[in-house]
Each structure stands twice: as C-alpha cells, then as structure tokens.
Image: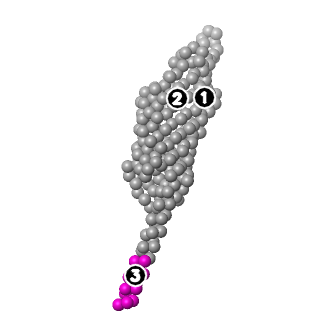
Amino acid sequence: MKKIILIIALMFGILSVTSAQEQDETNTVKNYLNSVKFSTLTFINGTFQLSYERFLKTDKSLEFFAGYTYRDNWKDEREGFNFEIQYKYFVFESEGRKTVKRLYFAPYASFHYTDLTTEDYYWFEYPDEYRYSKENYIIKSYRGGVLFGFNWILAKRITLDVYIGGGIRKTNNFDKDDDNYYGSDVWEPGYNGIAPRIGLDVGINF
C-alpha cells in the first residue's frame, strides 16, 4: 500500500513539474512585449519598410510603420516615404509550448509622399519620328481602413504577420510645373478610391 501511495505521489510530482515547465515556457513567449518587423511585399515594389509593435495589453497592441521608396527604370523614377499606425485587437489565441497563434483585426491610418517622374513616348507622322514628354508629379496620399490578420510566434522569438483588408485612399496629384493631374491604377501611388491591402511581415520579439 505504501508503495502504491509513493508511486501515485511520484506521478503527481512529475506531472506538476512538467506542467509548470510548459507554463513557464508559454509565459516566456508572451513576456516579450516588443517586436521589430520587416515588410516583405512592399520591398518587392521598391519600398524598404520597418515597423515597431508594442503590446499594451494581452489582447491589444500598437504598431508604427516607416518606409522609404526608391525605384528608377527606363520609364519612371520615384522616390518617397510613408508612415503608418495600426491598433490591433486580438480576438482569438492559441498557445503552445514555444508558440502563440493569434487572429486579429486592426484599423489603420497612413500617409504616403511620392516624387514621381514619368516619360511618355509617342509617334509623330510629320516629321516621322518618336518624341517623348517628361513630367514630374508630387503625390500625397492619405489612407485609412481595416486589416484582418494572423500572427504566429514560433521558436519564442520569431514573429510572422499575414494580413489582408483594405480601405479608402484620398490622393492629391499634381505636376510641379503644369498642375496636371496624374491618374493611375489601384496598385500605383496616384490612385484615388477604394483600395485592397495585403501584407507579409517577418520580425523578432524582444
């Protein structure tokens, strides 16, 4: 009987230690309240963008973005910067030993400034030759909307954000010389109206 009691006590002791270790590891993951991230999709379009996220509560965080754009090819040259703020509300969470998975939605607001120079080529019948016009635009864009995202923390330190959503863009476009309006499609800086949004950010927690 004493042996049975000793075995049961030993089993409970092992289970308690294991549970405590798992809880400590989970808490260690959630004790990192800061993140620095790199935006991968904007980089493809010529924008280097970083963000800093700070958890205010267990289910809320504030994230600041700053980016610099530079692209130069045979048809257009653009340079600019952007700032953005997101307030995240986490609505679902699943914890593991070294991972945390969260679903969230985030209202956002941003400002984008772009100095864009374009060259348009056209054909003249008389005289028979190609000509081109060169125009320089200053584009200021104010944007706001809502994002829905998935946040995955793995190996305690690495964080991954995938999000999709959209909102409204209000853009002021003008030529610095002639005040001509510059129009463009939804993926270009001069677009006005409802626009989609998609992102993939990778970073580290500390």
Q: Which residue is mark 1?
A: 78
Nearer to the camera, 15 or 200: 15
Nearer to the camera, 27 or 73: 27
Give how far across and how far down residue 178 sits, in percent: 57, 14
Q: Residue at x 41, y 46 (%)?
A: 89
Give how far across and how far down residue 146 sits, in percent: 41, 38
Give how far across and how far down residue 188 sits, in percent: 52, 29
Q: Residue furthest top?
A: 126
Magenta stretch bounds: 1-13
Q: CA distance from mark 3 to mark 2?
A: 68 Å
Q: Residue at x 60, y 35 (%)?
A: 68
148 w.r.t. 134: above or below: below
Q: Which colour scheme appears in the figure?
A: one colour
Confirm whether residue 145 shows in the render: yes
Q: Is residue 129 left or right of residue 168?
A: right
Crowd class of label 1 (few under 14; some 14 to 19; many from 20; radius 10 Å): some
